[in-house]
Image (cartoon, rainbow, N blue to C red):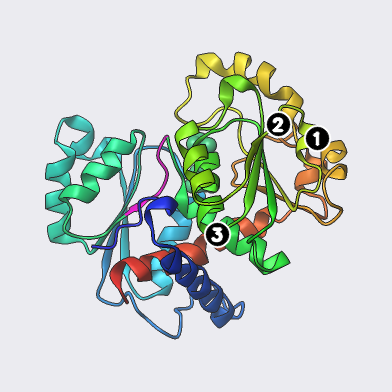
């Protein structure tokens, strides 16, 4: 069974194959209208369930559109409207859904829910974000970087702010795609040391630098994410903002990186908090390509999972 649960749990050649396939499918569409099917219809006869236990705009729409472009059918399910949210076990849900659908994508809180779904489903399961990782996003980010700047191997990526779920997937990608990552943020919000260690063992240079101006020196890519994630307590908002304010990505910080450094943000962004509008809408920002590439990268991930 080919589940797509995390970047560090997927073989390197498979990750590369997925990125190549995403590029090929994107160029194959050649800007045609979004509702027009792809020439190849690899998901014809396939039914996909998209389960959301947290809000989503990009993941929800890009998966749904991607399935349709490839000739499949999809249904978007809200966790709270399912029996899953009312006491039915994850294992039983997985067994039942496997009798109806060919592929399950789930966005959830605890990583254990994703793992249990994968253990008991007899169809592939895709991680659409957990409290601990967001692998589909980073596959799109790698695709986007390479589209603009060529191979990401050997490049310097700087993560600013909270060492959260998206940062964890960047660490996994650093190890698998061979780039270096510098984290700059407050000590209280350091990335998971387990993943820092994993990326270092995989051969990447992972640096923690408290001074954001020093951190971005020589950076090829600067990345920001929200200061308060969906799994964070709203009561921690003010405390987190106070800690994170010095790590805002603004023009002064971007000017300290390489002149052609790209800026990425998985979105949704909070303008003038983790990033200024000047940077988001500026010449180095590739955030809209990044959002579009969710569609292409996830189409490639679904094909890989289904072997079609
Ligand atoms: N970046 C991302 O996953 O966005 P959504 O929360 O809108 O899906
Ligand atoms: N870190 C953010 C990413 C949103 C796509 C969150 O988990 O809310």
Quadrant where the N terminus is found in the figure:
bottom left
* Magenta segment includes 67: no
- Ranked by sequence position, the earlier of labels 2 and 3 is 3
Q: Where is mark 1, residue-wise?
A: 214
Magenta stretch: give its range. 126-131
Cα gap from disc 2 to disc 3, whole angstroms: 22 Å
Q: Mark 3: which secondary structure? A: helix
Looking at the image, can residue 118 be seen?
Answer: yes
Marks 2 & 1, CB-CB < 8 Å contact: yes
Residue 54: quadrant of the picture:
top left
Residue at mark 3: 177
The answer to whether mark 2 is within 8 Å of ligand 2 is no
- Crowd band around label 3 with a 10 angstrom C-alpha radius: few (<14), some (14–19), many (20+): many
> Is residue 128 rendered to the left or right of residue 306?
right
Percent x, y of residue 305: 32, 66
Q: Main secondary structure of the magenta part?
A: loop
Per the image, the residue denoted by label 2 is 209
Residue 113: horizontal and vertical position, in percent?
27, 38
Q: Residue 146's image quarter?
A: bottom right
Q: Note whether 212 is above or below 222 in the view shown.
A: above
Q: Quadrant of the C terminus?
A: bottom left
Q: Is label 2 in a helix, a strand or a loop? A: loop
Sequence order check: which comes first, mark 2 or mark 1? 2
Residue 128 within the magenta-colored segment of the rendering: yes
Relative image position of residue 134 (x, y in whole percent) = 46, 46
């Amino acid at each position: 069974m080919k589940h797509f649960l995390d970047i560090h749990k997927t073989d390197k050649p498979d990750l590369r194959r997925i990125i190549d396939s995403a590029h090929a499918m994107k160029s194959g569409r050649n800007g045609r209208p979004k509702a027009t099917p792809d020439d190849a219809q690899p998901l014809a006869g396939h039914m996909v369930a998209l389960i959301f236990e947290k809000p989503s705009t990009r993941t929800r729409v890009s998966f749904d559109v991607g399935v349709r472009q490839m000739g499949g059918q999809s249904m978007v399910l809200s966790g709270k409207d399912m029996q899953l949210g009312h006491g039915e076990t994850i294992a039983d849900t997985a067994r039942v859904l496997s009798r109806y659908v060919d592929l399950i994508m789930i966005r959830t809180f605890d990583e254990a829910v994703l793992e249990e779904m994968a253990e008991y489903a007899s169809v592939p399961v895709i991680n659409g974000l957990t409290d601990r990782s967001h692998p589909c996003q980073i596959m799109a980010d790698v695709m986007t970087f390479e589209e603009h700047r060529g191979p990401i191997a050997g490049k310097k990526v700087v993560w600013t702010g909270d060492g959260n779920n998206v940062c964890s997937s960047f660490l996994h990608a650093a190890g698998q795609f061979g780039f270096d990552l510098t984290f700059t943020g407050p000590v209280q919000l350091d990335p998971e040391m387990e993943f820092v260690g994993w990326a270092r063992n995989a051969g990447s240079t992972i640096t923690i630098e408290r001074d954001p101006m020093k951190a971005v020196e020589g950076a090829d890519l600067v990345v920001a994410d929200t200061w308060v994630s969906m799994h964070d307590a709203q009561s921690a908002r003010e405390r987190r903002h106070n800690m994170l304010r010095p790590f805002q990505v603004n023009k002064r910080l971007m000017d300290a990186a390489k002149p052609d450094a790209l800026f990425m943000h998985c979105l949704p962004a909070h303008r003038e908090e983790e990033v200024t509008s000047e940077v988001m809408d500026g010449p180095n920002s590739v955030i809209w390509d990044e959002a579009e590439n969710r569609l292409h990268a996830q189409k490639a991930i679904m094909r890989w999972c289904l072997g079609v």
